[in-house]
Image (tube, rainbow, N blue to C red):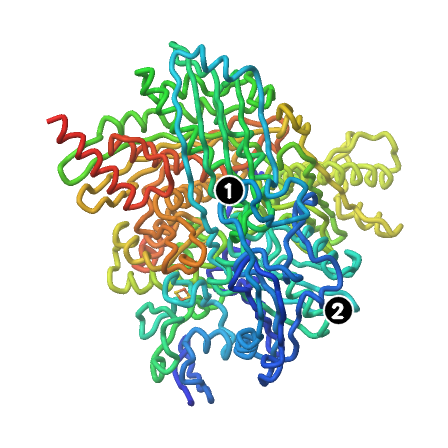
Amino acid sequence: MSLGQSLIRLGTEAKVRGETRYGFDMPQAGDLHLACVRAEQAPAKIVSINPAQALAIPGVVRVFTAADVPGEHRLGIIAVSRDQEFIAPGLVRQPGQCVALVAAETPEAARAGARAVVVVLEQQPGVWSYDEAMAPDAPLVQPDNPGGNLLRENKIRRGDADAALKDSAVVVEATYTTGRIAHCALELEGGRAWLEGGRVMVTACTQNPHYDQADLARFLGVGEDRVRVIQAETGGGFGGKLDLSVQPFLALAAWHLKRPVCLRYTREESFLATAKRHDLRMHFISGADEQGNITALRARIDGDTGAFASYGLAVNMRAAVHATGPYRTPHVDVVARMAYSNNTFNGAMRGFGCPQVALAHEAQMNALAAALGMDPFDLRKQNALRHGDHTATGQLLGAGVGLSACLERIEPIYRKWQSERRHADEYREGVGVGVMFYGIGNTGASNPSTAQLEWRPDGRVTLFTGAADIGQGSDTALMQIAASRLGLPMERIDLCRGDTDRTTNAGATSASRQTYISGNAVMGAAANLEMQLVQGAREMLNQRHLEVELKDGMLVAADGRAVEPAEVARHLAKAGGRARGEGRFDPNFTALDPETGQGRPYATYAYAAQCARVRVDTASAMVKVTDVAAAHDVGRAVNPRSVQGQICGGVVMGVGMALMEHYQQGRTDNLQAYHIPTAADAPDITPLIVEEPEPSGPYGAKGVGEPALIPTAPAIAGAVSQALGRPMRHLPISLERVMEALTAAEGETTRED
Amino acid sequence: MPLEFTLNGQKVSLEDVPGEATLLEVLRQRLGMLGAKEGCGVGECGACTVLLDGKAVNGCLTAAWQAAGRQIATVEGLAQGDELHPMQRGFVETGAVQCGFCTPGMILTSLDLVEQEPVPGDQQIRRALAGNLCRCTGYHDVVRAVRRGAKYMRGEGEEQ
Ligand code: FES
Ligand code: FES
């Protein structure tokens, strides 16, 4: 059994040898190189595009404009908000939007060509924030959107929040904000396309090859069978490679020029042209009774999705659904609104709105504890969701709620750190806690995965999956699940992944869904394969009703006879058949009621509790996160080391979100200005795995990819708040903000003296 | 201009290298050595790290001509056939590789560190790697990897 073992991730050896070829490494000799012409002004009408000077540059072979797009201009993952134009047809909606595409023999010529295309724009009035977008008579960003600039409003209503707040012993109210965050996967977007037999082949980094295929076909105006997408090894994604990036440009140019083409984004282009994490503004009013039981939450959440919807609908819905945090809250009134603006678009990033609302719900817990005179950790334990509780959407939680277990694991560490806390003239220390729950898979919507397992006549097994591994380790996890279910060592199984010709749709690598959903699809494929093998063995043994089972890779009959599955495969092959099992899994959900948000949005939730210890230097206002302990209920750890790796990566991304990352378009479009945590910034991390099996999960597994990040920033914010003696409600907790708080605190001490 | 240097122990000579070409461009575009990555092109991420006479440098900031007559080591040159370099083994065994895009640069920077400090402490490792960004691992396992790789390089712990 390989399940539960810390196996080395597949592909690791090639990576340490430098042999792995990422999308970014795809260009080959003789390829044409592409470069995007990006509009500097927005919103703007395109008055004219003159390619003459570009075409005069030696090596430039073609300049494409929107007129060259044979199919639909408007693409996007969520069908009801498909609105992203890869080459702007007439109107530039956001800065940096591509208006023309240059193909040339060399990268230098392509770049020179892109600079030489003359684009005349006529500036239009724009809107640059949620408030501007929602002002009466605001210019419309996407005039076709039925709600004007309002992309979506999501409501969660349960009980009577206003009345419950009136009757509460304590009520706390505050506004919280978070900054825009860039994914900064180390691999820049890149890929290659060419034609083969009248079909276009695209290989690029991606989190969702089958979606790419569908949208590229739409873009080219051809059937999906004319497009093949092969996921290149992908150097991190974190949600940033869920939307299409280079692929439409590649497909379009290869389609017209009938030559292999390649394209890579620069870091600046990647900042400008791909999604960011939404900055949210969150106004929360929370109440509790005298005993410290939470009574109600009233929350208003505003977001700006930028010029394109991307995953804005998903972020808005998730923010609303998770606004209470993992706490029993009998009365809930949440309204989340997402508006268009002319900013560069925001989309999916690790956690889809949950890391943002976690800042608010955790700070509210601290504020409630203070108002009640209670210990903030005890308050969380008391209100933590347990089996038999209902969520804000009215979902009854059955098995698989490991939150109390996570809190138990964290508590001794939290108490110890609190007791060790020191203040000196030069520094202040603080300890904070962050807790979260996270629904696995898409919200209140079908999001199936499929997989196949084939026992080949040569005795080896192939696992076919469309699930994109982007470095997080789904290949290994799915292989471990397959190996365990078939009773084989993993070495006997080959993997075929992410090729739309050879695998079927597994949905996006997002929403922490691949272990749970694709893992279940693999379980299904194995069961189906086993059934075929058993049938085949019965035929071969000439006994229709013989009991046969697959045990340790062997078909063993009740009468003691045994058949090798490979023999069955050969037997089936003689008749033109194959021993190939099909699996499909779609989590059990119900859509949310549009008025009340009631329903069962997810089949299962992951839970986590983290605590962080910080030291604030009083002279420099520098915050150092020294330690983080992170307990995560993953249901079952398919590969414990991989889970720990995910936790540590998420925690450090959370450090960035808490303290330093703040994307400002036009100002932080490179890594010199946009800082992500380095090894020197990273805390000591204690990853703790909690296994509260999820009955519907493969071997009880849920997921961990996004949960790893969500509690970290709230825990750090709590710790800094404690250190400074005042609540830090806005992320990032920059030097300026700490300085301000230190000065204010100083003022207070002086007055008290 | 013509350019000669030693790459992973082998002499290479090139013609017509543009004066403004970076070492990274020459390695990737002229020599097909794709182990060194480009993550920013401006010296901020360390994905392009190579060893120049044993010192870790950013390939994207190093002019190609600076390599003339010198020893360049890239990640491709570390393993001896089937046998991984001890530092590579450290990275494999500790699970320090997720997407792996930062890994070649991390390994080469670590070799430079261990050359100077055969028994590096965690804080030394963190400081040495501060110019190599990783967005996946949180550096936790990377620090363990370097410790383990350094140990293997000292000839310790082979039996494990
Ligand atoms: S590519 Fe050289 S430091 Fe980033
Ligand atoms: S492993 Fe992905 S950037 Fe380091």
- Residue A387 percent across, percent down from the top left: 54, 18
Q: Which mark is residue A196?
A: 2
The quadrant of the rendering that contains the N terminus of chain A is top right
Q: Amino acid at mark 2?
A: Glu
- Disc 2: host chain: A
- Disc 1: host chain: A
Secondary structure at numbered mark 1? helix
The residue positioned 68% from the left and 69% from the top of the image is A253
Secondary structure at numbered mark 2? strand
The quadrant of the rendering that contains the C terminus of chain A is top left
> Of residues A295 and A208, which is closer to you in this image?
A295
- Residue A680 percent across, percent down from the top left: 30, 51
- Residue A574 percent across, percent down from the top left: 87, 52
User: Is A76 left or right of A241, judged from the image as shown?
Assistant: right
Residue A65 appearing in the image? yes
In this rendering, do the residues under marks 2 and 1 share a single chain?
yes
Among the two numbered marks 2 and 1 on one chain, the one whose residue lies closer to the N terminus? 1
Q: Nearer the viewer, mark 2 or mark 1?
A: 1
Ligand 2 positioned in quadrant: bottom left
**Callout 1 crowding tier (Cα within 10 Å): few <14, some 14–19, many ≥20:** many
Alpha-carbon distance for marks 2 and 1? 46 Å
Q: Amino acid at mark 1?
A: Tyr
> Of residues A324 and A624, which is closer to you in this image?
A324
Instruction: Note whether B31 is above or below B93 in the view shown.
Output: below
Residue sitting farthest toward the left:
A753
Instruction: Note whether A571 is above or below A290 in the view shown.
Output: below
Instruction: Note whether A185 is above or below B40 in the view shown.
Output: above
> Of residues A400 and A446, which is closer to you in this image?
A446
Give the labeled residue for mark 1.
Answer: A130
Residue A635 appearing in the image? no
Quarter residue A429 falls in? top left
Q: Which mark is residue A72?
A: none
